[in-house]
Amino acid sequence: MGWRQDDFCRWTLLEGDTATLTSVTGDACPCMAWRSPGYSPEWHRLNSESDACNGTGLINTSTETTSIKGFFYRTDIHYSFLTEDQKIPIGELQDADVVLFGQVNATTGAFVDLSSANVRADKITLDSVDYEIRKILEPSITGRIGQMTTLKRKS
Ligand SMILES: [Zn+2]
């Protein structure tokens, strides 16, 4: 007998830690499609009159912040729950990184899906520290309830 996602969302809204999700949307920067897919500092050197995307891959951006609730863990605890196959795509984690299990909108209690998060531009802020959204394990892997997301501390 497993938990259903709406039970999980109610529990997360009551007991979770509060953090802020910053979502950035915009137009794809031309540097992203130049030569090879991905951010290109070289394109910006050659096109210095064009808008700088500052590594986000987006220009003409707008930013939305959402108060969320979820459970934040140290990475060593998270690692002990994972199989070897699941550890590989996450890669090396540092002590300063954290893992988020959740997550819901802190106002409405609705599940917040991070699967379309922009890894380069979006961030999660917990206790005034900014984290990059690194790797998301879908509910199918984490017991069909919440997503498990690796957060890399930004320097
Ligand atoms: Zn760019």
Image (cartoon, rainbow, N blue to C red):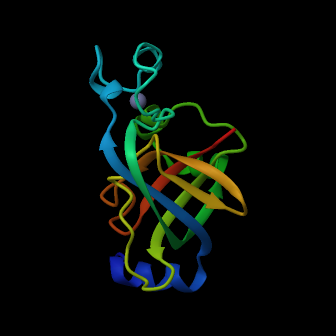
**Above/below status of 104 relative to 146:** below
Identify the residue at horizontal 34%, vertical 61% (top origin).
139
Q: Which is more toward the observer, 45 or 135? A: 45
Q: Which is more toward the observer, 2 or 132? A: 132
On the image, the x and y values in percent for residue 35 come to 28, 13
Q: Which is more toward the observer, 3 or 51? A: 51
Q: Is residue 84 left or right of residue 126?
A: left
Q: Is residue 97 left or right of residue 50?
A: right
Identify the residue at horizontal 58%, vertical 51% (top origin).
78
Q: Is residue 97 left or right of residue 11?
A: right
**Above/below status of 1 relative to 43:** below
Q: Which is more toward the observer, 69 or 47? A: 47
Identify the residue at horizontal 44%, vertical 21% (top origin).
44
On the image, the x and y values in percent for residue 90 come to 48, 37
Report which quarter residue 146 is drawn in: bottom left
**Above/below status of 88 relative to 6:** above
The residue sitting at the front extreme is: 49
Instruction: Name the quarter where the C terminus is drawn.
Output: top right
- Whether residue 107 is visible, yes or no, is yes
Ligand 1 shown in quarter: top left
**Above/below status of 46 relative to 99:** above
- Whether residue 1 is visible, yes or no, is no
| Figure disc tally | 0
On the image, the x and y values in percent for residue 145 come to 37, 69
Identify the residue at horizontal 48%, vertical 32% (top origin).
55
Instruction: Name the quarter where the N terminus is drawn.
Output: bottom left
